[in-house]
Amino acid sequence: MNIVIVGTGYVGLVTGVGFAEQGHRVSFVDLDSKKIDYLANKNLPFFEPGLGDYFTNEENFQRMSFHDNYQGLSWDETDIVFICVQTPNNLETNSVDTKFLESAITEISKLDNQDITITVKSTIPPYEIENVCNNVGYDKKLLTFNPEFLREGSAVHDFFNPDRVVIGGLNLEKIEKLKQLYSTYDAEIIITDPISSQLIKYLANTYLPMRLSFVNEATRLAKYSNANLQDVLKGVGLDDRIGSHYFRPSPSWGGSCFPKDLVEVNNFYKEDELNLPLISNIIESNDEHLKWTVNQLISLKESNNLEKIYLVGAAFKEDTDDLRNSPTLDIYKILTEMNIEVLILDPQVEVSELAYISEIKDVSPNSLLSIMYPQKEEFGNNLSEFCSKNNCVIYYPWS
Ligand SMILES: NC(=O)c1ccc[n+]([C@@H]2O[C@H](COP(=O)([O-])OP(=O)(O)OC[C@H]3O[C@@H](n4cnc5c(N)ncnc54)[C@H](O)[C@@H]3O)[C@@H](O)[C@H]2O)c1
């Protein structure tokens, strides 16, 4: 098929490169012309494990084209458009910022071609899409939805091996086109209406941070009770109604999706009509855990007479360079405001505007090293050896 990908971020680029690998022709359009130049010169604008190999493969690359405007695309030959633009939280209104989506749908509404299957991959509530469609005069019934569940750090694997494919829409022909595209996948395809398709995405992104927050609250309770945290979590997780996958403590969770999607899921309902105390308090639980982590670090530093704190791992999780809503940056800010000397140590991701180092050998003796997430094994081993020789203390959130 001929596919157009609108927005070459984490979702758009991984999706487009994945479809090119499957033999489809893929045109990317992004208003960021620097990014487009970069891509056209065979460079990736961010780090995602495994993506480079598929992207630079010559046969795949020949199937891809890059555009910084909508006019240069061959719309008449296009079968499916995937809109993958960002949908951040608008801090003033505390709701999703639709301006990127509105600009994409405005361009698409100019096409005089109703045969193309226009599919929203971005996470966006359908009532917001309705407003956007009304604003730009586009028939919302023509849109299809295909929410994305990939995880940064294993996005390429997730593209080829999704747990499920969700298609939302009202137009049967367009739904059929998407079904055809995904027909080779070994995953259940759920076909539903637009609202349900987006609610699946929002509730998945509600359950996951809720689970992480549960483990973090359990961690606080276990430490408070002087219990053995690892034994407790193992004992709870071995119940197969609970499971031990995705059941590990962290300094708090972050990233480009959970925080904003949790804000938005609470905009799905009016508080005087529906009360969802569990869902509406997940962010508060996470904020509390971040403060608790900061206090843990301060008390460890003081009780061991240490001089500096190093936060090991800059991004919001391992195997990505995405710094959006990274707990490391939040903790760094809080500690700096308390005049505590804090630096970030990351061998892969540079945060040069902050106090940052990339090499273990540059860590000062008598320091506290807080591991923000599992590091690659060899780095962890080097760290333990270095710490025992240099009177440093390591803090692992899960120990
Ligand atoms: N990042 C993830 O792990 C992830 C996972 C699942 C779903 N999502 C959802 O997918 C969507 C995209 O997320 P992302 O992290 O890939 O975003 P991103 O910020 O990495 O990339 C978005 C891209 O869209 C481009 N863009 C903005 N407006 C445009 C326009 N009008 N026309 C063309 N290009 C335009 C931007 O320049 C940018 O390159 C969001 O709704 C997000 O919630 C993200």
Image: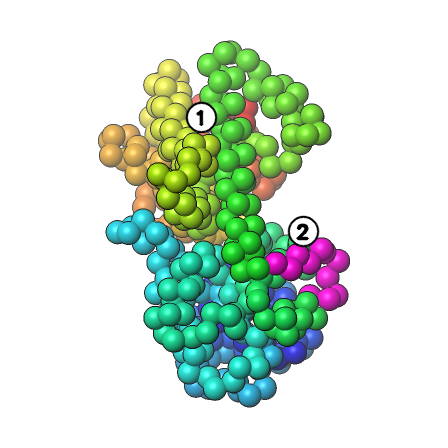
Locate the C terminus by quadrant.
top right
**Residue on which the image places disc 1:** 392
Give the image quarter of residue 230.
Answer: top right
Q: Residue tagged by mark 2? A: 163
Q: Position of residue 341 (x, y in %)?
A: 30, 32
On screen, residue 178 above or below 285: below
Segment tinted magenta in the rendering: 182-192
* Residue 373 in picture, x, y percent from top left: 51, 37
The residue carrying mark 1 has its beta carbon less than 8 Å from ligand 1? no
Quadrant of res 3: bottom right
Q: Residue at x 73, y 66 (%)?
A: 183
Tell whether 7 sits left or right of 175.
left
Foreground label between 2 and 1: 2
Q: Is residue 190 magenta?
A: yes
Measure the alpha-carbon separation of dots 2 and 1.
Answer: 42 Å
Q: Is residue 277 magenta?
A: no
Q: Give the residue displayed 39% in from the left and 25% down from the top.
A: 292
Residue 357 percent location from the top left of the image: 40, 44
Task: First in sequence, mark 2 or 1: give its number.
Answer: 2
- The amino acid type of the residue labelled 2 equals Asp
Residue that appears at 35% across and 58% down: 97
Q: 10 Å neighbourhood of mark 2: few (<14), some, or many (≥20)?
A: some
What's the mark number on residue 62?
Answer: none
Q: Nearer the viewer, residue 207 or 360?
A: 207
Q: Label 2, secondary structure: give it.
A: loop
Choose between 107 and 41: the one closer to the eye: 107
Rendered-image quadrant of the N terminus: bottom right
Looking at the image, what colour scheme do you see? Answer: rainbow
Which one is nearer the viewer's eye here, 226 or 106? 106
Most extreme residue toward the front is: 273
* SS state under label 1: loop
